[in-house]
């Protein structure tokens, strides 16, 4: 049987219909869900991602406030901007686009975001709460992946899940979310020996490496569920070699149109949830 396509784009479109309805109900109560986006510097890819998030807000009747800062911004200056947004009752969610220029202490700035407005799930407190199964917005890319798995009724409990990558916004929270759903989780990274052998054991495989087609299709276990979080616009591929995946996987996310649209949708959904908490 050909591998089932886990269509993140279609799922995001479906979810948008519900979000739109909820936004108009909130507006009737005098609340317009509002996301503040902070872009530091001129990285074109980051600017595109921020624009896509702002466009999603506009499409769904939500507000977005764009804060654009110069590439020379200091940590102190960025902290002040975040503090102002934290104290602004009209702002429900704050997105600090990653990565920021290297002179900035990104972790310190992420952690200065009020956890109630941490709709992108980047703070240590949010990560800790999510890991402990407490109420928190999980990091958007892994949380979006969990929504895909849930929608397509992919069984997680008792499965061997292998996550390739351990970044704070993707690999680590992904592993914790799968663990919380009772998967047996292996996290691989750049120092992992015999990567292939770990991948071969994966019932659920998540590529979150940032290296085009690093993961070869002949390393993948028969009937595995394959999630590719990577996207490389130049090579037009993800982190996994998906050519011919049909004959191997039981289900997979396409690139593009898999994980990416659900990342944005999850950010918007979380902003809606943050606004809904006010009524
Ligand atoms: P990152 O911060 O660069 O982390 C990459 C991770 O991969 C690190 O943990 C690194 O290990 C590991 N790694 C690198 N080379 C490896 C190798 N040869 N073997 C095994 N592990 C290796 O990247 P990221 O932000 O997590 O992003 C990962 C990918 O996801 C990228 O393609 C990015 O574009 C994509 N992404 C997509 C979305 C979306 O919305 N779709 C959102 C975020 C990211 P060490 O820790 O040992 O260095």
Image: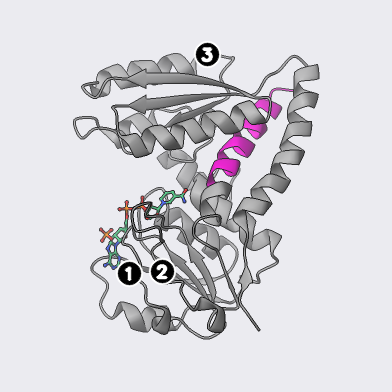
Residue occupying the point 53% across, 28% down: 54
Q: Quadrant of residue 27?
A: top right
The residue that label 1 is drawn on is 214
Q: Would you say the beta carbon of the disc 1 residue lies within 8 angstroms of ligand 1? A: yes
Q: Quadrant of residue 208?
A: bottom left
Q: Which region is colored magenta?
A: 263-279
How far from the left and from the top, in percent, is residue 125? 45, 39
Q: Residues within 10 Å of mark 1 (few under 14, many from 20)?
A: few
How far from the left and from the top, in percent, is residue 132? 53, 52
Residue 254 appears in view:
yes
The residue that label 2 is drawn on is 240
Q: Main secondary structure of the magenta part?
A: helix
User: Is residue 272 highlighted in magenta?
Assistant: yes
Image quadrant occupied by the N terminus: bottom right
CB under 8 Å between discs 1 and 2: yes
The residue that label 3 is drawn on is 88
- Determine whether 276 is above or below 191 in the image: above
Q: Quadrant of residue 246?
A: bottom right
């Amino acid at each position: 049987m050909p591998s089932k396509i886990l269509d993140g784009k279609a799922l995001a479109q479906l979810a948008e219909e519900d979000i739109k309805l909820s936004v108009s109900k909130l507006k009737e109560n005098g609340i317009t869900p509002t996301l503040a986006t902070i872009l530091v510097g001129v990285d074109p890819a980051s600017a595109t991602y921020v624009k896509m998030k702002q466009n999603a807000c506009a499409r769904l009747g939500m507000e977005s406030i764009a804060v654009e800062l110069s590439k020379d911004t200091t940590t102190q200056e960025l902290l002040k901007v975040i503090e102002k947004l934290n104290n602004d009752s009209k702002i429900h969610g704050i997105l600090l686009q990653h990565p920021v220029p290297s002179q900035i202490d990104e972790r310190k700035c992420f952690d200065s975001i009020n956890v109630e407005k941490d709709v992108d799930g980047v703070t240590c407190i949010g990560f800790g709460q999510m890991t402990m199964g407490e109420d928190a917005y999980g990091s958007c890319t892994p949380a979006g992946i969990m929504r895909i798995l849930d929608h397509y009724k992919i069984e997680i409990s008792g499965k061997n899940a292998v996550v390739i990558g351990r970044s704070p916004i993707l690999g680590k929270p992904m592993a914790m979310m799968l663990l919380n759903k009772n998967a047996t989780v292996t996290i691989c990274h750049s120092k992992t020996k015999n990567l292939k052998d770990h991948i071969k054991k994966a019932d659920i495989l998540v590529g979150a490496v940032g290296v085009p087609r690093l993961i070869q299709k002949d390393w993948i276990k028969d009937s595995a569920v394959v999630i590719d979080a990577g996207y490389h616009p130049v090579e037009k591929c993800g982190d996994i070699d998906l050519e011919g995946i049909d004959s191997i996987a039981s289900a997979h996310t396409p690139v593009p149109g898999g994980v990416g649209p659900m990342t944005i949708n999850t950010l918007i959904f979380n902003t809606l949830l943050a606004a809904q908490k006010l009524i």
